[in-house]
Amino acid sequence: MQYPSKLIEDAVNEISHLPGIGKKTALRLVIHLLKQEKETTLHLSDALVKLRTEVKYCKTCHNISDNETCEICTSHRRDHSVICVVENLPDLMAIENTAQYHGSYHVLGGIISPIDGIGPDDLKIDSLINRVKNKEDKIKEIILALSSTMEGDTTSFYLTKKLKNFDLQVSTIARGIPVGGELEYADEITLGRSILSRITYLQE
């Protein structure tokens, strides 16, 4: 692809490094930015610079934060005796958006995946164990909210073994048929787990 300007080419190349964005989409974005007021582009670039230079990771749960400790970990409205273990930030945000969970979190920063060269030492597992060991926190339950994949199950199994000697409950999120889903299209593992995780049908 030929560009009328080296500056445009450089901008396109950088933007195309973002996931899901090819050269054509990047070019459209660059042209769009050029058509905007100068302040609009400057505000975007300023926000990106601050994102890389000022964002922090919570020293307790490893959630992204503006401060050393995130708002969830410092909130007096949360139940800090319960920790929900998630793989990454999008998973944490997904659970928060349900408004059904009121405990704390622990972000592993990934899951065990030997194929990708990711082992237990590459994850935030030691800090989770240290939180459990800390008697001041009085952890009563660990909820494993990891993906229903081979890697996710491997990570859950590993964490369960690491936590088995502590006096606490280790649970996992229920996995079953989604609302609006047809049974005939569900895979055997999901359908099997739905049967095992069945609940009492309440009648009014």
Image: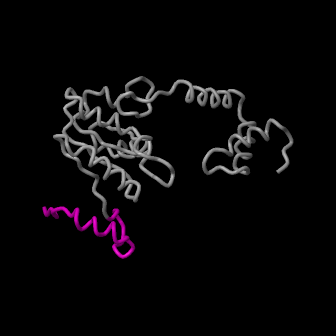
Q: Residue furthest bottom?
A: 184
Q: Is residue 112 left or right of residue 116?
A: left
> Residue at point 28% right, 44% down?
162
Give the image location of residue 34, x and y in percent. Answer: 75, 36
User: Is the image coloured rainbow, by chain, by secondary structure, or in one colour?
Assistant: one colour
Q: Quadrant of the C terminus?
A: bottom left
Q: Position of residue 4 (x, y in %)?
A: 86, 42
At 34% from the left and 33% from the top, the residue drawn is 127
Horizontal side, residue 120 vs residue 78: left or right:
right
> In the rendered view, would you say 55 is above or below 129?
above
Magenta stretch: residue 182 in it? Answer: yes
Q: Residue at x 35, y 45 (%)?
A: 95
Query: Can I make out residue 188 in this image?
Result: yes
Tell me which segment is drawn in magenta: 177-204
Report the number of discs.
0
**Measuring 33% from the left and 73% from the top, which residue is drawn there?**
183
